[in-house]
Image (cartoon, rainbow, N blue to C red):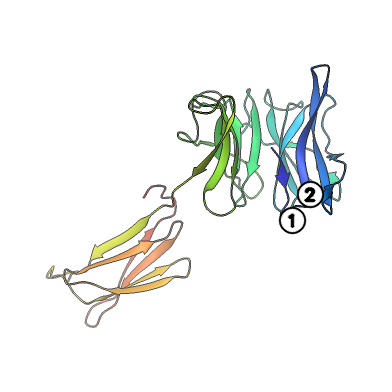
Amino acid sequence: PMYLNQRGSVMYFTKCKVEKKKQLGCDIFVSQRKGKLWAEAQKLQIKVDSGATVGHPAVTDDENTIFFSSDQKGGYGGKDIWVVQKIKRNQWSEPMNLGPAINTSGDEMFPFIHVDGTLYFASDGHIGMGGLDIYKSVPDSNLSFTSVVNLKSPVNSPGDDFGMIIEKEGERGYLTSNREGGKGGDDIYQFELPPLEFSLQGVVTDSKTGAIMTGINVQLNGSDGTQNEIKTDNTGKYRFDLEPLTSYEIIVNTEGYLTKIARETTEGVEFN
């Protein structure tokens, strides 16, 4: 996996030394584009144990934080995911292990950090569907990860699923898998999470008589700043389309009646 910065001028990637079919470890390298050409890659100056393998850079958009996979000492076994933060130009903090919520005695590799801060990674140590599965975790403000979620089928399969990247806008991306039905070996797959669809509907009635009330204004105010208004139809019904991750107030205010306010939210709702 490779990371290219926003301007397309800096590239972070994994480079492995091999001599006579012997693997001599891997490191993260950085190359800068000079015009149309790329300058000679320089090893990323992060402090790791000699002989440790380091790779799979996942870089935040501001290029101040890098997640990577390494088998260096101080982990939980196998390859773990670590993070470093930039102190100043070409100087990085001591690597910090992401802890037991993320890392296991197995291998955790292929981290990817989304613009919303969510970490995606592959692991064969968490309980999953078989082989490497893809997981996600949302950190708190101190880069502390306390839980992981298996992305399940159809993202994961009984084979190896890894190397997920997600586009900045929406829920479309790519992953690598050796699942059945491919061309052979590891194949690249594209996926898209359909947008969630939410609607709100109700009937306005007189609380004393139970009679339906037609032509009544119903106002919908969203926490995203949106405001909509509609009149009830001849059966007293109203209906609004809602956005994900938004809280709403439904307000009915008509002459001769007390104002009625109801509340609804789509935050935390993961199904249509």
Spatial CA span between label 1 and label 2: 8 Å
Residue shown at 46%/56% (left/top)?
245
Q: Quadrant of residue 259?
A: bottom left
Taking the image as drawn, is residue 116 in sight?
yes
Residue 174 appears left or right of 64: left
Residue 86: give its label. none
Question: Label 1 neighbourhood size at 10 Å, few (<14), some (14-19), many (20+)?
Answer: few
| Label placed on residue 10 | 2
Give neighbour class at mark 2: few <14, some 14-19, many 20+ (Cα, 10 Å): some
Position in image of residue 183 (x %, y %):
54, 28
SS for dot 2:
strand
**Furthest-bottom residue in this view:** 255
Question: Is disc 1 in contact with disc 2, using a CB cutoff of under 8 Å?
Answer: yes
The numbered dot on residue 7 is 1
Which residue is found at the position 29% from the left and 77% from the top?
253
Q: Which residue is depicted at the point 80% across and 25% down?
A: 25
Q: Is residue 234 above or below residue 90?
A: below
Q: Quadrant of the N terminus?
A: top right
| Residue 16 in the image, given as x and y percentages of width and height | 79, 28
Q: In which quarter of the view is residue 176 placed?
A: top right
The amino acid at mark 1 is Arg
Query: Which residue occupies the foreground of this view, 46 or 3?
Result: 3
Q: Secondary structure at mark 1?
A: loop
Using residue 121 as the reference point, say whether residue 52 is left or right of it.
right
* Mark 2 residue type: Val
Query: Does residue 101 show up?
Result: no
Q: Is residue 249 above or below residue 19?
A: below
Counting every numbered tag in the picture gives: 2
Where in the figure is residue 79, as x and y percent of width and height? 69, 27
